[in-house]
Amino acid sequence: MDARPRISRLVALALPLLLGGCAVGPDYVPPEVTLSPKWSDDGVPAARPDRLATLGEWWKGFGDPLLDRLIEEAVAGNLDVAAAKAKVREARANRREAIGGLLPQVDGSGSAERVKTAGAGGTVSSQFQAGLDAAWELDLFGANARAVEAATRGVEAAEDDLHATLLTLVGDVATNYAEARGLQARIELARRTAQSQRRTAELTRTRFQAGSVSAVDGAKADALAASTEATIPELRSSYAQAVHRLSVLTGREPGALAALMVTPKPIPAPRRALPTGIPADVLHLRPDVRAAERRLAQATATIGKAEAALYPSVSLTGQLSTTGVRLGDLGRASSIAWSWGPSISVPIFHGGRLVAARDAAEAERDQSLAAWKSSVLTALEDVENALVGLAQERIKGRKLAEATARYRQAAELSRTLYASGSSSFLDVLDAERSLYSVEDSLLRSRVAVAIDHVALAKALGGGWSRPIGSAKTQTADSTPRPRSTEAEAAAGE
């Protein structure tokens, strides 16, 4: 009797049950949070929604082509990004595996044997076998559907983690680049200042030879110049470390960018303010907040999967086999055997293991909720701190610029008066020391403005907005893989 009509009728009866089944467990509802309509700094205007898109490539506001190039290279070569891409591929593979639980499972088998019976006159014969085994679990209570839902949320969280890695990477590249340029400027300032102080010392020695000043003045002048020169090695060491970090961020050996960075360039200065928006924007602009929310959704779906284990499971199973002494016998109706039918499994006693698993899933959901709330508060704190830091650093920079201009006038005047004998060397010493200190502080403040600008961009969720592929593997296996017969393997991504 042909089994196909019976199997078709069984599938027709099972489909309404499958489609009519309900997924147990809580359905995910995005959490709500009440946020202030504006940031604490009332002086920062909220941006129009269409301007928020400019956060995607905020670093171009520095107008530095080399910085743009380094960020491009970092996105392509950074190893943390490569690891995040691999995690995305892993999450997608886990989702395909979960989808497989919704589909029938079919396995084939076959064997061929030569058999000799016992005894001196035993005969030798052949035996061939072939068969198919099929099973399909009817997802009546949504265990497999919840597993797919959880895996889907896991894919989304992994993708947001990738964007969070990119956000951090872009910020780190910009920060280290600004520090490197600032250190170059400070090295050059120290070198110029030391040369000026050496000239002052030479003038002091000339006046000492004329008998108009004491040897103490010359010693102090030389000491001041040497003290300034002593700051250069430390600055050069810090500069080398910044360049090394930039090289590693781009996925290369530490010294790879030394030649590219050797020519000094101005400290990056933002040409336009960042669109700050409103506090609620961080919920969808910050990838770490989005990832935490997706993990909350994943944990909620996992509760349903654990809850479904408390209910009966129904499967449809079937078997088709054939045997013969010759290969041609396998196709004969008389050699074919088959079986099919439903099976049910009812959990009766598991020592509380299934209930405990559900309770553990609920606890994990609560942990995910707390983690999401914490990520929101951290994001808000990051923005508030960056806003205050940037605003105050700009005020500090303006005051330092004013102080630098005044100290420069004082240093020039004191040297002129000292050369004419109208002022003491102590005035020159104090003016030059003060001028160098405030000029160095001004350079460090300009670097701080750039870094605070970067911090604000990161806090607002600005990062890499262009598409980035994650399907390509980083390594090639030396052993070829066997060709899979599963349909999902052919489907790919």
Image: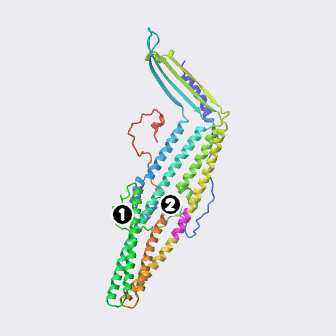
The stretch of residues the image draws in magenta is 382-391
For the point 59% across and 65% down, which residue is it? 38
Query: Horizontally, is 244 left or right of 54 in the view?
Result: left
Q: Position of residue 249 (x, y in %)?
A: 42, 57
Circle 1 SS class: helix
Residue 89 visible in the picture = yes
Circle 2 SS class: helix
Inspect the image, locate mark 1, and give the three-letter code of the amino acid beneath it. Met
Q: Taken as a whole, is the magenta stretch helix, strand or loop?
A: helix
Residue 467 visible in the picture = no
Asked if the stretch drawn in magenta spans residue 132, the answer is no
Query: Horizontally, is 419 left or right of 441 in the view?
Result: left
Q: Are marks 2 and 1 in contact (CB under 8 Å)?
A: no
Asked if the stretch drawn in magenta spans residue 387, the answer is yes
**Displayed quadrant of residue 482:** top left
Q: Dot 2 surroundings within 10 Å: few (below 14), some, or many (20 or more)?
A: many
Q: Which of the two residues, 103 or 372, is positioned nearer the viewer here?
A: 372
Which residue appears farthest toward the front when viewing the image?
215
The answer to whether 135 is drawn above or below residue 379 in the figure is: above
**Which callout, 2 or 1, points at the residue further toward the start of the chain?**
1
The answer to whether 189 is drawn above or below residue 134 in the figure is: below
Q: Position of residue 256 (x, y in %)?
A: 35, 58
Inspect the image, locate mark 2, and give the three-letter code of the amino acid beneath it. Lys
Residue indicated by mark 2: 458
Q: Dot 1 surroundings within 10 Å: few (below 14), some, or many (20 or more)?
A: some
Q: Which of the two residues, 218 or 439, is positioned nearer the viewer here?
A: 218
Residue indicated by mark 1: 261
Q: Quadrant of the N terminus?
A: top right
For the point 51% across and 41% down, which residue is it? 94
**Displayed quadrant of residue 120:** top left
Q: Position of residue 455 (x, y in %)?
A: 50, 63
